[in-house]
Amino acid sequence: MLVRTNETMRRLNDGPLAVLVGERVFSSEFKYRKGTEVFGEGDAAEYVYQIITGAVRTYKLLADGRRQINSFHLPGDMFGFENGASHRFSAEALVETKVRLMRQRSLLHTVASREGSTTNLLRLVTQSLQHAENHMLLLGRKTALERVAAFLLEMDDRQSHPDVMILPMSRRDIADYLGLTLETVSRALSVLRDDGLLRFIGTTQRQVALLNRCGLAQYDA
Amino acid sequence: MLVRTNETMRRLNDGPLAVLVGERVFSSEFKYRKGTEVFGEGDAAEYVYQIITGAVRTYKLLADGRRQINSFHLPGDMFGFENGASHRFSAEALVETKVRLMRQRSLLHTVASREGSTTNLLRLVTQSLQHAENHMLLLGRKTALERVAAFLLEMDDRQSHPDVMILPMSRRDIADYLGLTLETVSRALSVLRDDGLLRFIGTTQRQVALLNRCGLAQYDA
DNA sequence: ATCACATATTGATCAGCATCAAAAAGGCAC
DNA sequence: GTGCCTTTTTGATGCTGATCAATATGTGAT
């Protein structure tokens, strides 16, 4: 994505709602097994979630099964915040995922009684909006290679540029995020590998070492 | 778009920030000629805008000129709200446009001192996010015909289902909104016309009568 | 280790939309 | 109205990415 700065170094209890933590607002924890639904589109929006460990995809479906993933959520990220009474999209655990959760009503109430946290909550929503704006540019106007390069740089950034990046999602998930097919994603990754921009680590294809981040950024428009 | 309910009947002074109007918050009005820039990506985000008459496009550009329009703003709509110090996208008047504008700092300050308006401001941002989520689904997963049908239904809804809808934007604007080329948009409109779903009114091609909204909705996925 | 199933890669072909091109229609100044 | 420029439509062709298909690799259970 275009905006990568300041997305790094997110830690638990260090996000926009840090001020609320430890105030009996985050009432409980919960664990989801790989592939299970956290909530579905149209479900009552009772809780807000923060990921402790694991990863979650949020997505919308068309009637015939076409899927668009809005975003991937990693440890520290919050999701599920809704204005209305029901969720506008679905959320599923990509892998075994532990979350902290609290009631939305409780959150809004707490926020309303506290100056400053208002702005934090607003910032949280604004950041999602910013991500969405960048993603619309990607979906509307970028080529397959540009999309995949942007995706790798986004994940790299959100994992704080590790030597070996772990992708918790399948090729199909990546494809549904980028508005492509899984075959096209696979081919693009192969091109980038053959061009010496990345290397797959070990036996799995979900551990990636970025060998040339600047080169990758060239591929991204 | 998927969400059309409650987008109708928006009037001036009747939006999310109605509570703020008449409180010397909206300091002034300004007029932009057709095609002129309201603000550019990266500009200092000093003001928030509300359209009185006319229409505005907000968009992002890639280095080589590819453009993605995030949204079209019609009378009553607000835009230009930013979390950070600078605008994340550009805004231009589609036609001669009159706006009301106020300083962001002033808005935030006023909001902070008033219970309730916080939630309204939050709702404003959340609505933009909701629009973005629906648009990502369109950009990532819908065909050209589905996109154009969805566009017509969105505009129809936002103009409160008039007999004759006026499109203030060019085919190129529509294309850049829908992630297509202007030729593809033109062809899709011709298909819908030939199928009896719409009719062009008068001499211009920017006045459209929707003859069969349910039929159009079938085209949309 | 073996088997069954899920995931990923790679290849061949196809289709939808983009691109290139030209003509028609509309808008606007004079 | 006339002329000029912009916008829109329509047509011909091409290319990117989708689809269909086969193989390879990985994973998890027993």
Image: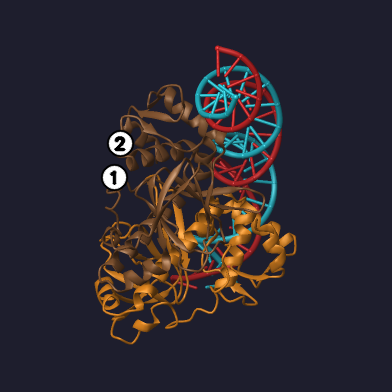
Chain colours: A orange, B brown, C cyan, D red
Looking at the rendered structure, the kind of residue marked 2 is His
Residue A114 image offset from top left, x and y in percent: 30, 80
Question: Image point 32% across, 79% down: which residue?
Answer: A115
Q: Which mark is residue B161?
A: 2
Q: What element carries label 2?
A: loop
Q: Which mark is residue B149?
A: none
Mark 1–mark 2 contact, CB under 8 Å?
yes
Categorize mark 1 by other alpha carbons within 10 Å: few (<14), some (14-19), many (20+): few
Task: Confirm whether residue A207 shows in the render.
Answer: yes
Residue B24 image offset from top left, x and y in percent: 32, 63
Task: Confirm whether residue A179 shows in the render.
Answer: no
Residue A63 left/right relative to B68: left
- Quarter holding the C terminus of chain A is bottom right
Query: Which residue lies under the disc numbered 1?
Result: B8
Looking at the rendered structure, the kind of residue marked 1 is Thr
Depth check: give the residue in front, A96 or A75: A75
Depth check: give the residue in front, B154 or A61: B154
Placement of B12 over or under A23, stated as above or below:
above
- Quarter holding the N terminus of chain A is bottom right
Residue A189, located in which quarter of the rendered image? Answer: bottom right
Placement of D27 over or under A179, stated as above or below:
below
Marks 1/2: CA distance? 8 Å
